[in-house]
């Protein structure tokens, strides 16, 4: 069975059009399917525009009482799916249902995860530049195989979910988690239609949180197995700077009679030494947590 998960927020004009187009596309597939709609606390009466679809046994509708974010909406969809092949789509009609069959075809070819690459993107310049920077950063520092990791249109086998837990905004680096866990991934070019209804949900706040998520991904996939490598470098550097300052002041006191109480550097040196030790200890605790987690999973 194919499960298509569509999270949405205030898309009352787009959702009915999208669902009808999907139904037309899915009719030609010789396989069972379901469309899972997750209303993430919409305030524009989106729910009432799609109530008729609930009469179709292949369409499920779930509602959040308040807006929890796209990650939680995807999680709700995942918790209620029954299919073995899963598709994520955005609700704004920019993802084209005509590309769905090509995603399914790649899964049938043996790929575990298929990510979309938006052609001729109909987004503003800031969004395009942001996406390019994120893709470049992940490719350089994390060896990412993806050209357009932020594309919301993707398909994958259910088994990949065993290696990932959705929470908050971490859905942004779901494709990386799939790749780092050794699954077979690929990409296909997809259409990126112009938004016909409503307005984009992408704003300055998402730009900022997106950058934070990118840094989070860097830490998780670079140092999650060896946290001491990350904290050790930072803590060790901080400790060495603090020790060097303290050593220099000690030389001044022993050989030149300088009163340390008059030197603010003394307190800076001591502070850096303490902070450095604490950061290193954080890395050691992280190593212990990783070890215990692996041991419990055996």
Image (tube, rainbow, N blue to C red):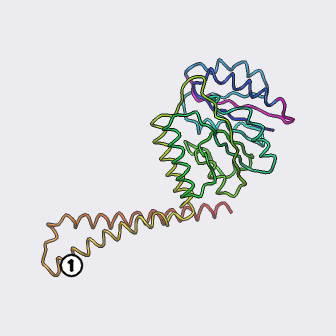
Count of all numbered marks drawn on residues in the image: 1
Residue 65 x, y percent position in the rendering: 57, 27
Q: Tell me the residue at 17%/77% (across/down).
A: 253
Residue 162 x, y percent position in the rendering: 69, 50
Q: Nearer the viewer, residue 197 or 46?
A: 197
Residue 35 is inside the magenta segment: yes
Q: Which quadrant is home to the C terminus?
A: bottom right
Question: Residue extending furthest front?
Answer: 120
Q: Tell me the residue at 53%/40% (across/down).
A: 128
Where, by quadrant of the figure, is residue 264 drawn? bottom left
Question: Residue extending furthest right?
Answer: 30
Where, by quadrant of the figure, is residue 41 drawn? top right
Q: Tell me the residue at 67%/35% (across/down).
A: 191
Q: Nearer the viewer, residue 25 or 159?
A: 25
Q: Which quadrant is home to the N terminus?
A: top right
Q: Tell me the residue at 60%/46% (across/down).
A: 149
Where, by quadrant of the figure, is residue 46 drawn? top right
Residue 139 x, y percent position in the rendering: 57, 55
150 sits left or right of 272 in the view: right
Q: Residues within 10 Å of mark 1 (few under 14, many from 20)?
A: few
Residue 287 is inside the magenta segment: no
Reading the image, the residue beneath label 1 is 251
Residue 238 x, y percent position in the rendering: 36, 66
Dot 1 falls on a residue whose secondary structure is helix
Q: Nearer the viewer, residue 288 or 221?
A: 221
In this picture, which residue range is highlighted in magenta?
Answer: 27-42
């Amino acid at each position: 069975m194919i499960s298509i998960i569509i999270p949405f927020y205030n898309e009352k004009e787009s959702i009915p059009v999208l669902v009808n187009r999907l139904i037309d596309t899915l009719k030609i597939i010789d396989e069972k399917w379901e469309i899972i709609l997750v209303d993430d606390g919409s305030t524009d009466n989106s729910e009432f525009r799609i109530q008729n679809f609930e009469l179709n046994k292949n369409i499920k509708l779930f509602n959040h009482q308040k807006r929890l974010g796209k990650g939680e909406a995807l999680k709700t969809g995942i918790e209620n799916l029954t299919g073995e092949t899963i598709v994520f789509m955005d609700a704004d009609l920019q993802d084209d249902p005509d590309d769905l069959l090509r995603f399914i075809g790649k899964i049938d070819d043996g790929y575990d995860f298929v990510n979309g690459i938006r052609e001729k993107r109909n987004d503003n310049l800031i969004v395009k530049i942001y996406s390019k920077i994120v893709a470049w950063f992940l490719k350089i520092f994390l060896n990412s195989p993806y050209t357009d990791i932020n594309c919301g249109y993707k398909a994958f086998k259910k088994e990949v979910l065993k290696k990932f837990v959705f929470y908050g905004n971490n859905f942004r680096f779901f494709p990386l988690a799939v790749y780092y866990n050794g699954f077979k991934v690929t990409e296909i070019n997809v259409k990126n239609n112009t938004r016909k209804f409503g307005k984009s949900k992408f704003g300055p706040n998402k730009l900022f949180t997106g950058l934070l998520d990118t840094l989070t991904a860097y830490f998780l996939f670079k140092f999650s197995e060896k946290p001491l490598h990350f904290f050790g470098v930072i803590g060790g550097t901080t400790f060495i700077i603090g020790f060097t300052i303290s050593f220099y002041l000690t030389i001044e006191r022993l050989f030149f009679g300088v009163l340390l109480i008059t030197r603010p550097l003394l307190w800076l040196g001591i502070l850096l030494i303490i902070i450095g030790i604490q950061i290193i200890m954080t890395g050691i605790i992280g190593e212990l947590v990783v070890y215990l987690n692996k041991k419990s999973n055996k």
